[in-house]
Image (cartoon, coloured by chain):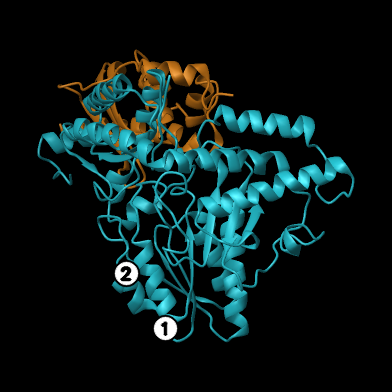
Chain colours: A cyan, B orange
Amino acid sequence: MIYADNAATTKMSDAAIDTMVACMKETYGNPSSLYEVGQKAKEVLENAREEVMKAIGANNFREILFTSGGSEADNQALRSAAEIGRAAGKMHIVSSAFEHHAILHTLKRLEKEGFEVTLVDVHEDGLVRPEEVEAAIREDTCLVTIMYANNEIGTIQPIREIGAICRAKGVLFHTDAVQAIGHIPVNVQEDNIDLLSASAHKFHGPKGTGFLYARKGIKLTNLIEGGAQERGKRAGTENVPGIAAMAVALNDAVANLEQNAEITKKKRDRLIAGLKEIEHSAINGDETKRLPGNVNFCFEGIEGESLLLLLDDKGIQASSGSACTSGSLDPSHVLLAIGRVHDVAHGSLRLTIDEKTSDEDVEFIITAVKDVVTYLRSFSPIWRDLVTGKKEFIL
Amino acid sequence: MALYSEKVMDHFRNPRNVGVIEDANGIGEVGNAKCGDIMKMYLKIEDDIVQDVKFETFGCGSAIASSSMATEMIKGKPLSEVRELTNKAVAEALDGLPDYKMHCSVLAEEAIKSALEDYEKRKEEK
C-alpha cells in the first residue's frame, strides 16, 4: 500500500502514540484538579504549550490556545477579529477565493451579519499577490486572512510580505497554516502573523487536536462557553493526551523539517516530471512555490473518482477535486479559482507524499497513473471527441 | 464500509460492452462535461431486437458501472422491453447506489432512451 494522501491526514508517529498512551495511563487527572494527578496533567499541558510556542517562534505561552483542530481555530480567529472590528466600526474583511471551507463558510456567516468580504484573486499559479491584498485593504478593514499553503494544490503564499503590509496598515492578519506547520518554516514573529491556526493530524499528531496562536493583546471571542479552561477563552476539559502528543509530533516535525523537506521535494519533482509525460495534462499551481510533498494534476478527458478507485485497486491512496468525490455537483473551488474550467477540473489528482515515500513508490505511482489514465481515456466519449478533432483540447 | 456494492465495483472494474459499434443504427449521448458525467450508447437493432450494444462513459465509478449494467440488461432484448427499462431497475441490479449517485443510473436510462429516439428518427428518414 502506498499512502499518498498526507494532506488529508497523516499517520501518527510512534512517539506521538506512545506519549498519548502514557498520558492516558498515567496522567489521567483533570488539569483543573488540585491533587497530584491533576497537577501532573496540568504540567503536561503547560509543557506542551511551551513546546508549541517555541515551535512557531512565539515568545509568550499565553499566546497559544488549544482547540479541537484547525477548523475550530479558524472559526475562533475570524470570529474574534470580526468582533474587534465590529466594536471599532470596521466591518470589512479581505481573504482569498481558495481558502479552506472553515474560512469561506465562516466568512459567509459574517456576511449575513453585515460584514463585507473582498476575495483577492489567486491567479493561474495559485499565488496571492501582496500588492493586490494591499489594494483591497480599506479604512474599515478589520482583518486579512490568507492561508499559508493551499490544501489542494500546495502553493505557498507570500505570507511574510502580506503580514508586513497588514502591520503597516494596522490591520489584523490571520493565516490558516494547517498545511504548512511542520512542513515548511513558519515563524509568527518573522512572518508578521497576528493569528494562526494549526491542526495536529497534519504533522503526524492525533486528530481532534489543534491550536490557535493569537498575538498578545488580541481579545479572543469564545466559541464554547463554560469553565475557565484556556484562560476562559475555550471551555471544556482539555484534551491532555492529544495535546501532549501534538507537542511531541510538532517538535519532531520542526526538528527534522529541513532534512525531510529536502528528501520529499526530490521525490515530488520526480513525480511531477513523470506525470508531465502524460499528454494533455497540466500541473495545478506553481511548480516550485509549493509544499514539499504536494503534486496536483489535471488530466483531460477523464474523471477523478474513477481514477482514484482504480489507483486504490493498485494500492495507491490519493484524492481528487472532482465533484463526484465531494458529494456535490461542482468540482473543487480551488481548481475553479485558479481558472481551471469544469471539464478539466473534474479530472484532477492530488498526491501528497512525505519523506517516507520510497523512490520505488514514486516510480510505481507514475506507471500506475499513466496506465489508469490511458485506460479511462480508451472509453471516454470526451477523449474520443478530442482526438478526432470534434472538440479542442484545453490542456 | 465500502462506498459501493460489490456489484458496482465488479461492473466498474470489468465493464461489459465497452467500446463503439461502427455500424450502429441508434446512438445516444447524454450528460455534460461540466457536471462530470457523459454517457454515449451505441445500439445495433435488427428485427426490433437489440442485437448489440456498446458504451463509452466519462464519469465516476458508479457512472461507468451503471452504463455497463444497463447494456447487459438490454442486450438481446426486444425493443418493447428495452423501452421499459428504468433507472431504478439499473440501480437495483447493481445492489443499490448511494443516494447522491442515483443520477448516474438516470443517465444510463436516458442514454438508452436517447439512442432509441435516434434509431426511430433514422427509420422515419429512410
Residue A24, above or below A75: above
Q: Chain of mark 2?
A: A
Marks 1 and 2 belong to one chain: yes
Where is residue A251 drawn, in percent x and y?
A: 53, 42
Cα distance in 3D space between marks 1 and 2: 15 Å
Q: Secondary structure at mark 1?
A: loop
Residue B62: percent from the left, percent from the top?
43, 29
Disc nearer the start of the sequence (1/2): 2
The location of residue A287, given as percent across then percent down, is 24, 46
Quadrant assignment, res B123: top left
State left or right for residue A366 relative to residue A232: left
Q: Secondary structure at mark 2?
A: helix
Q: Look at the image and tell me whether residue A106 can be seen.
A: yes
Mark number displayed over residue A130: 2
Residue A334, percent from left and from top: 37, 52
For image coordinates 9% across by 39% down, the residue present is A389
Which marked residue is nearer to the observer: mark 1 or mark 2?
2
User: For this rendering, which residue is in front, B18 or B76?
Assistant: B18
Q: Amino acid at mark 2?
A: Pro
The residue sitting at 56% across, 67% down in the picture is A215
Task: Tell me, yes or no, whether the two marked residues, 1 and 2, touch with CB atoms within 8 Å.
Answer: no
Left or right: A332 as drawn, with respect to A206: left
Label 1 CA crowd tier, 10 Å (few <14, some 14–19, many 20+): some
Q: Quadrant of the N terminus of chain B?
A: top right
Residue, disc 1 = A138
Residue placed most toward the observer, B11 or A130: A130
Q: Amino acid at mark 1?
A: Arg
**Observer able to see residue B73:** no
